Amino acid sequence: MEMNPMTNKADATALYDAAMRGDTETLQGLLRSDTLLLRKLPLSSFTETPLHTSVLAGHLDFSRALLRHEPRMAMEVDASNCTPLHLASAAGHVELVRALLDTAGGGSDACLVRDVDGRIPLHLAAMRGRNDVVRELVGARPESVLVKLYDGETVLHLCVKCGHLEALKVLVEMMVSSGGKRDVIESIFRSGDEGGNAILHAAAMFKQVHTTSYLVSLPSMGAAVNSLNGFGSTALDCLELCPKDFNSLRIRDLLVEAGGKRAKEMTAASTDRLPPQINLVY
């Protein structure tokens, strides 16, 4: 009997409806009728897989069933170039994230896939403060912490800008506990966005008192407290440009207590250390 390589539209529609409901019985029935149904889906007009639909709806059992039958689906992307792991990470579905990461054939590879905006799953989890998901993703692929957005922002920048201090703490603690060298961690703290702003610059400009307090307390922050952005400004300089209020005054005290300086103070200090100039007579 000749096998029809095309997907039956009614079966495909029934499959996506089942994914929306989390109906595993319907899934099994469809696969009994056509064992290659999942393999034929790329030939259909749908822009995402049933796994995307199931994950977005939060159906763990249905998603696991799909992954058992077609593990390669974990790496498929939708119209926004999002894998199912992007969706699960953004939504904070920890068990779904684990199921996707444990998929045979390299499920953790999805950790490094960028969506159309250049974001990997870790970026989405950090932006929404999904702390448990952050732990799972970094545990699976520690190098994902080093992946920057197209504008140069790190995942640490996203934590600061989105106001998720606990997610920031999780990331820093995992970098330290994994044996990251102090100079490497300090270089990450110094890393700037497209304007050269490091995470301490961002914390100061967004007037985040608790985040600033946490960052300056870290031994790995070190000399990064006075790192310069693309305009030659320190975090203290950036703060001085912001409207004054209670938070800005508190942050100023925190920065100064940690050794923070204005850029012009650093220049003056460097000049003072230069040897006296000798006037030669010819």
Image (cartoon, grey):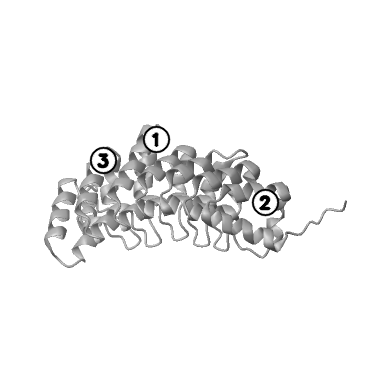
| Side (left or right) of 144 relative to 183 | right
Amino acid bearing label 1? Gly
Disc 3 marks a residue whose amino acid type is Leu
Residue at the right extreme of this rendering: 1
Give the residue type at disc 2: Leu
Q: Earlier in the sequence, mark 2 or mark 1?
A: 2
Q: Position of residue 94 (x, y in %)?
A: 43, 44
Q: Residue at x 57, y 55 (%)?
A: 18
Q: Position of residue 125 (x, y in %)?
A: 41, 51
Can residue 156 be seen from the camera position used here?
yes
- Residue 218 bears which disc, if any? 3
Q: CA distance from mark 1 to mark 3?
A: 14 Å
Q: Position of residue 68 (x, y in %)?
A: 62, 41
Q: Secondary structure at mark 1?
A: loop
Specify which label sits upstream in the sequence, 1 or 3. Answer: 1
Q: Secondary structure at mark 2?
A: helix
The local crowd at label 3, few if under 14, some if 14 to 19, many if 20 or more residues have their Cα within 10 Å, is: few
Residue located beneath label 2 in the image: 30
Can you identify the residue that label 1 sits on?
A: 180
Count of residue discs: 3
Whether residue 247 is situated above or below residue 32 in the rendered picture: below
Helix, strand or loop at disc 3?
loop
